[in-house]
């Protein structure tokens, strides 16, 4: 078991560590309102508009988490030439992420998840409705060539994260392209929705339980079934490890040598909001690997971060100081 001093040492290295991320950038937009009355036109609540919050989501949330940890981050991705794209770049810049390497694609609608929240000034706001603006990047567009041209900029990074939300920025051949750029010693970690099996050659992956079930083609009810599936997918990907996130059941880590470890949930199993927790796991795992941690140490820190972030409302990030506090204080 890694001791407290060792984990704190890894966190301290974040401020001198460089990482990169390639992925599908999403804008999480929260519309805030106060209930006014029931509409005469339909049985719905009318909200008095109070404000709007724009927060990085998807791969952009992983970037924001990396920046919050104090890492030097290189971002590779695409946004549209629309208002949400501009808002997302601004939100990332405010969080310390350099956006010059992001590609602006004319005519592409930046994926945007709009949540409408209602509540009083002294009460918890609840989600009333949500709608998604979704588009898929054209595979034959020149934007992809420009993305590949930007890969040499990440050559000095010791770890790269891939965040695939299915909007077209991440294609399976990106693994080979990254490997040619960074070499065999750089960690490549992956978070992919429902097509994780297409990315053979990554060093590690972080599917949630549903994604793991889809990848292996069967339902996983017990710890033993999850362990077997994690080991199977790790082998299929020819990866060095696979870290399956399981909500209030914690995580399951499978190594290439066949060792499987179940990590209990950190803190309480009563969560406030799971939005973006997978992005936090990817960010902290990649950060720790880049800082020289072992796979098990990295999984421990990612598990702690997940336990912290699910206690925050909305799309949230974890700082290095919060992670230090978790290491020192242990589960609450």
Image (cartoon, rainbow, N blue to C red):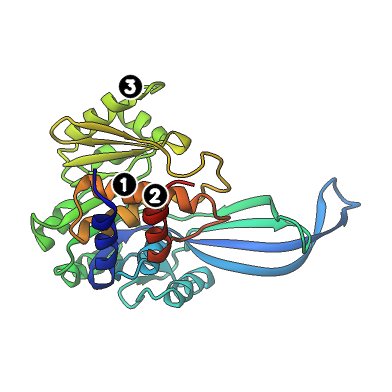
**Helix, strand or loop status at disc 3:** helix
User: Could one spot residue 67 in this view of the protein?
Assistant: yes
Could you say where residue 110 lies in the image, as x and y percent from the top left? 47, 63
User: Could one spot residue 161 in this view of the protein?
Assistant: no
Q: Is residue 69 left or right of residue 274?
A: left
Nearer the viewer's eye, disc 3 or disc 2? 2
Residue extending farthest right = 40
Q: Which residue is mark 2?
A: 304
Q: How many neighbours does mark 1 have within 10 angstroms: few (below 14), some (14-19), or many (20 or more)?
A: many
Could you say where residue 322 lies in the image, as x and y percent from the top left? 43, 61
**Helix, strand or loop status at disc 2:** helix
Nearer the viewer's eye, disc 1 or disc 3? 1
Q: How many neighbours does mark 2 have within 10 angstroms: few (below 14), some (14-19), or many (20 or more)?
A: many
Which numbered tag is attached to residue 300?
1
For the residues labelled 2 and 1, the Cα–Cα distance comes to: 6 Å
Which residue is drawn at the image coordinates 27% and 44% (left, top)? 205
Circles 2 and 1: CB atoms closer than 8 Å: yes
Whichever of labels 1 and 3 marks the residue nearer the N terminus, that label is 3
Q: Which residue is mark 3?
A: 225
**325 lies above or below 70:** above
């Amino acid at each position: 078991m890694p001791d407290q001093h060792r984990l704190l040492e890894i966190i301290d290295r974040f401020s001198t560590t460089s990482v990169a991320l390639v992925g599908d950038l999403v804008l999480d937009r929260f519309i805030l309102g106060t209930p006014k009355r029931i509409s005469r036109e339909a049985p719905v609540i009318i909200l008095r508009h109070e404000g709007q919050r724009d927060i990085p989501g998807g791969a952009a949330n992983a970037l924001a988490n990396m920046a919050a940890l104090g890492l030097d981050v290189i971002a590779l991705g695409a946004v549209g030439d629309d208002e949400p794209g501009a808002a997302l770049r601004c939100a990332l810049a405010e969080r310390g992420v350099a956006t010059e390497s992001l590609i602006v694609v004319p005519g592409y609608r930046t994926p945007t998840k709009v949540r409408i929240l209602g509540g009083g000034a002294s009460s918890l706001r609840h989600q009333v409705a949500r709608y998604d603006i979704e588009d898929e990047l054209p595979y034959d567009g020149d934007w992809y060539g420009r993305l590949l041209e930007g890969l040499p900029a990440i050559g000095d990074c010791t770890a790269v994260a891939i965040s695939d939300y299915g909007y077209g920025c991440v294609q399976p051949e990106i693994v080979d392209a990254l490997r040619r750029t960074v070499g065999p010693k750089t960690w490549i970690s992956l978070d992919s929705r429902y097509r994780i099996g297409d990315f053979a050659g990554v060093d590690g992956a972080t599917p949630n339980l549903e994604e793991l079930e889809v990848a292996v083609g069967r339902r996983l009810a017990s710890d033993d079934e999850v362990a077997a599936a994690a080991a199977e997918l790790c082998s299929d990907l020819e990866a060095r490890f696979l870290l399956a996130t399981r909500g209030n059941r914690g995580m399951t880590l499978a190594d290439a040598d066949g060792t499987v470890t179940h990590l209990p949930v950190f803190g309480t199993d009563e969560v406030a909001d799971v939005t973006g927790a997978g992005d936090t796991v990817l960010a902290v795992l990649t950060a720790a690997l880049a800082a020289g941690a072992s796979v098990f140490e990295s999984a421990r820190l990612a598990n702690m971060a997940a336990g912290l972030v699910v206690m925050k409302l909305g799309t949230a990030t974890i700082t290095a100081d919060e992670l230090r506090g978790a290491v020192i204080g242990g589960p609450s």
